[in-house]
Amino acid sequence: MTATNRDALLARYRVERDKRIRPDGNDQYLEPTGRFADLLEDPYTERVEREPVHDHVTVAFIGAGFAGLATGARLKEAGVESVRLIDGAGDVGGVWYWNRYPGAMCDTAAMIYLPLLEETGHVPSAKYTPAPENHAHARRIATQYGLYEHALFSTRVTHLEWDDAASNWIVRTDRGDEFTAQFVAMGTGPLQRPKLPGIEGIESFAGHTFHTSRWDYAYTGGDPSGAPMTGLADKRVGIIGTGATAVQCIPHLARSAGELYVFQRTPSSIDVRNNHAIDPAWFTDLEPGWQKRWQTNFTILQTGGFTDEDLVQDGWTDISQRIRDRVVAELSKPGAEFTPELMTRAFEDSDDEKMDEIRARVDAIVADAETAEGLKPWYRQLCKRPCFHDEYLQSFNEPGTHLIDTDGQGVERIDETGVWVGGVHYELDCLIYASGFEFRADVTRRSGYDTVGRDGTTLEEAWADGMRTLHGIHVHGFPNLFVVGLTQAGNLISNITHNLTEAGTTIAAVVGHAVSVGAAEVEVTQEAEQRWLSQLDSSTGIFGNLDCTPGYYNNEGQPLTEKDKLNGARYAPGPVAYFEHIDRWRSSGDFEGLEFRP
Ligand code: NDP
């Protein structure tokens, strides 16, 4: 691309971004209260009354998604039998419990995404597996490792408090439970509270309405495996949002609804999916230890590293491969040197090429020229969550599917009978919110309870200026507590479960060691925590990139505070180095930085 062409492209990106910048940033969203309060409830499992629990467990894990399951499994392997999962949902599965919308599937290849494939022997049905299969895999892990035994479902923790005299945690819940746990781990997820767009009149709509994370099959008909939604055949359905969730459910809505109106503020980038079945014979022949090798290979390639082969071969690694090929080609020229400018040029050329292909794909698939124009994304690929789908763009060729492009402005107003955009009223029977989830909330809000550590300090107080941990897991002042997440650790967003399983393996090693040496308490020293903080990169990359079109990735285009940056920081040398570091750290048996006390 010539310099002039690039200038023109970046100018276009800037115009599109500027259209969408709003001074209210994250405050534009509403929490589901009042009429929408039931969006936080569990429509899938009936809450059955039970007696409160008053007992003691070795480890309580708050959250029964893949974080809790992977940690629980590793704890059991380490001989720790008394493990209790606690979750507000009626079963294990976390994100795969809640998200049952039609078409839901994982965008990360199952071979590296689904935890413990070697241990469970499960053969993924396809390269990218559908939500029901992911949920079934969560249940498989829970069953195989006996994690249902002490679990408390449909139960929310309300308070967590360290008892210094007894060296354990007191856990209280909304079911009146009050039990103790020697260790507590929390893996409550980064994107679990549904949010709604703060559109004028949103409360007034008199038709049927729900959020994608609480899909109402009783109204729509159909089921999570994609059966036709017969209840929508004579309905005018609207959907607000065109992010990763909407991209997956819109093809199903387009097939089932009488009329479908897709209200778009910013188009997603839709790259090819190329899903295919997994051959069980090929799978069975894989060498032991393959899953870790595949995960490492993916992480290296996705984060710009070099390896001989690309095992996963998908859209996540594609752009890094292009950058790498360009760098290699440049460096093979006589006298060439590796410089930051060379990297920037390789990145920009690769991104320009990729986004051109993505826009050309829209033209190739979408028949109506105006609709096609509206569906083209004008930003760098990683500014927003990249999407991959082979039926989404085709949906707009269905006669009953209408793209209502708001030109970056969003829906204007909602009234009793429908939605207004650009002065035009769209009458609807059903309005679906694909408006995403809260991101960057403080720890108490995210988890829903206070965590009171040694000396009566809460985690929220301890982190008033930002998160402080060793490895993203251990917190000084909070003995026997483990945090499971992405930040201050590998922070690999392209394969979330890789972060979670590494944390789980680490926690199991620490707890296993504490139990074997008879330690009542384990706590990170202040010095070790401080040393780790000095090794973090708080520059946040795309998550702080204000040149990007706004969204949850870049804090809706608002500058990040120092606290936000610390909360989103990662080990500076990157995910591959983090995973190697944490493996060495736990395998050495020294657990440097932790103090084990009798
Ligand atoms: P997102 O936050 O990505 O999308 C919300 C959508 O709502 C955006 O398109 C947004 O537009 C739109 N919106 C918000 N306010 C308005 C308004 N006032 N008028 C019109 N539109 C509006 O949520 P998702 O649920 O789609 O995805 C959340 C995350 O969940 C993903 O990024 C991904 O990490 C994860 N996910 C993962 C999947 C997987 O395969 N593993 C599948 C699905 C989701 P705008 O872009 O302009 O802000």
Image (cartoon, helix red, strand yellow):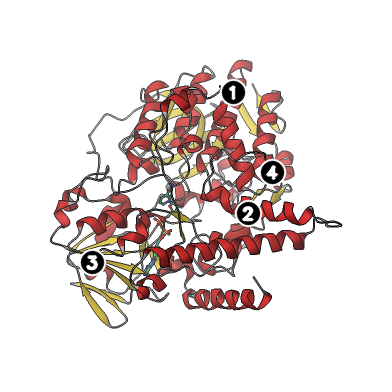
Label 2 to label 4, Cα distance in Å? 12 Å
Residue 194 visible (yes or no): no
Could you tell me how far apart the alpha carbons at marks 1 and 2 are, in whole angstroms? 51 Å
Outermost left residue = 234
* Residue type, label 4: Phe
The residue to which callout 3 is attached is: 399
The disc, 2 or 3, on the residue closer to the chain's N-terminal end is: 2
Q: Mark 4 to mark 3: distance in Å?
A: 46 Å
User: Would you say 396 lies left or right of 222 here?
Assistant: right
Of the image marks 1 and 3, the number of the one nearer the N terminus: 3
Q: Which residue is mark 4?
A: 306
Report x, y in % for residue 327.
Answer: 72, 54
Q: Which residue is mark 1?
A: 520
The residue under the point 48% across, 40% down is 187
Label 4 – label 1 distance at C-alpha = 44 Å
Q: Compared to 267, does 183 lie above or below?
A: above
Q: Nearer the viewer, residue 31 or 542?
A: 542
Quarter of the figure with residue 530: top right
